[in-house]
Amino acid sequence: MDIGGFFILVVFSLPIYFLFIWQYIEPEELFLWGRRWMYEEEPELSEEAIRLYKKTAIIGIVFTTIVVLVSFIQLFR
């Protein structure tokens, strides 16, 4: 991978990081993002669903970080 490919990877990973951080901080809001029209009243997520959304966010952040770090290391090999 050259420096241009790494730059594109970083640029595309920033919005993904933003979504994962938002998912961890406000899982209810992200769940309802684009789905509010489906419900007449405001639905409530269970504690189990909130925990699952937060775990998924942490796994996504770790995985994305690993991909960026491995790409950075390969850049200087």
Image (spheres, grey):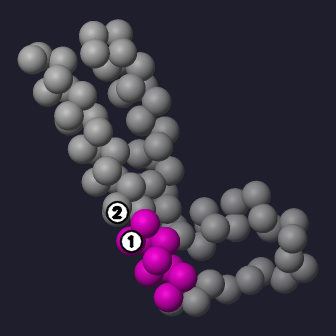
Asked if residue 58 lies left or right of residue 20, the reply is left
Query: Which residue position is annotated with label 1?
Result: 55
Considering the image in quadrants, where does the N terminus appear? top left
Considering the image in quadrants, where does the C terminus appear? top left
Query: Which residue position is annotated with label 2?
Result: 58
- Quadrant of the rendered image containing residue 10: top left
> Within 10 angstroms of label 2, few (less than 14), some, or many (20 or more) residues?
some
Asked if residue 49 lies left or right of residue 42, the reply is left
- Closer to us: 46 or 56: 56
Residue type highlighted by circle 1:
Lys
Residue type highlighted by circle 2:
Ile
Q: Is residue 49 above or below residue 66?
A: below
Task: Please state the horizontal and vertical placement of residue 33, each as a whole percent of the image.
Answer: 69, 60
- Quadrant of the rendered image containing residue 66: top left
> Within 10 angstroms of label 1, few (less than 14), some, or many (20 or more) residues?
some
Rounded to the nearest whole Å, what is the CA distance between mark 2 and mark 1?
5 Å
Residue at (18, 18) in percent of width and height: 75
Q: Is residue 27 above or below residue 34?
A: below
- Quadrant of the rendered image containing residue 2: top left
Q: Is residue 60 above or below residue 11?
A: below
Q: Residue furthest left?
A: 77
Q: Secondary structure at mark 1?
A: helix
Asked if the residue at tag 1 contacts the one at tag 2, i.e. Cβ–Cβ closer than 8 Å, the answer is yes
Q: Which residues are magenta?
A: 48-56
